[in-house]
Image (cartoon, rainbow, N blue to C red):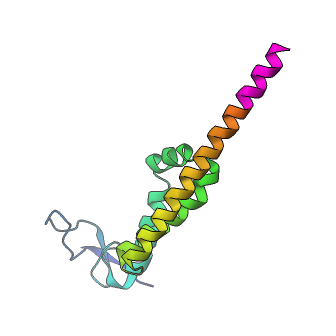
Amino acid sequence: MVQLTNRQLCHATRKDGQPCQAPALSDGFCFGHSPALAEKARQARLRGGQNKAQAVRLRRLIPPRLAPIFDRLEQVLDELHSGKLDPRIGSSMATVAAAMCRLLAVGELEERVRSLEESSKNAKR
């Protein structure tokens, strides 16, 4: 485990070129810049992004039946970005997922029309 040192700042440079102002751990880097903790930092960023208000609002927009497809595509995007997945496979998966989403959307519309027709027939009686 890497421990905090007395009031030293991280040796890394931020994306904007300024020195990082976070407290340094014993390796001279903060949690976000420490090479030894890179995987833990990546996982923490992923978990943090899942709890953002925008992510929560987006989740509410996804029909429940499409949530597993969305989750898998999100995983595929991460694998593509990290180079773990061949782009051709990712593209094929996205094409199939899009077709599945269209099919589910058509099915939901059919269900709504059927329900409205049924309500209309019952109202006429």
Report the quarter where the C terminus lies.
top right
Relative to residue 23, is residue 80 drawn left or right? right
Report the quarter where the N terminus lies.
bottom left
Q: Is residue 67 above or below residue 88?
A: above
Rendered residue at 41%/65% (across/down): 45
Rendered residue at 55%/47% (across/down): 62
Residue 3 visible in the current orientation:
no
Residue 82 visible in the current orientation:
yes
Q: Quadrant of residue 120?
A: top right
Rendered residue at 77%/23% (across/down): 119
Relative to residue 45, is residue 113 drawn left or right? right
| In magenta segment, residue 68 | no
Q: Is residue 23 above or below residue 119?
A: below
| In magenta segment, residue 124 | yes
Across and down, in percent, residue 121 comes to 79, 21
Q: Nearer the viewer, residue 106 or 59?
A: 106
Rendered residue at 20%/67% (across/down): 14
Relative to residue 75, is residue 25 drawn left or right? left
Across and down, in percent, residue 49 comes to 44, 58
Across and down, in percent, residue 110 comes to 66, 39
Q: Main secondary structure of the magenta part?
A: helix
Magenta residues span 115-125
Count of numbered marks: 0
Which residue lies most toward the right here? 125
Q: Nearer the viewer, residue 19 or 52?
A: 52
Q: Nearer the viewer, residue 12 or 48?
A: 48
Across and down, in percent, residue 18 comes to 14, 65
Which residue lies most toward the left here? 17
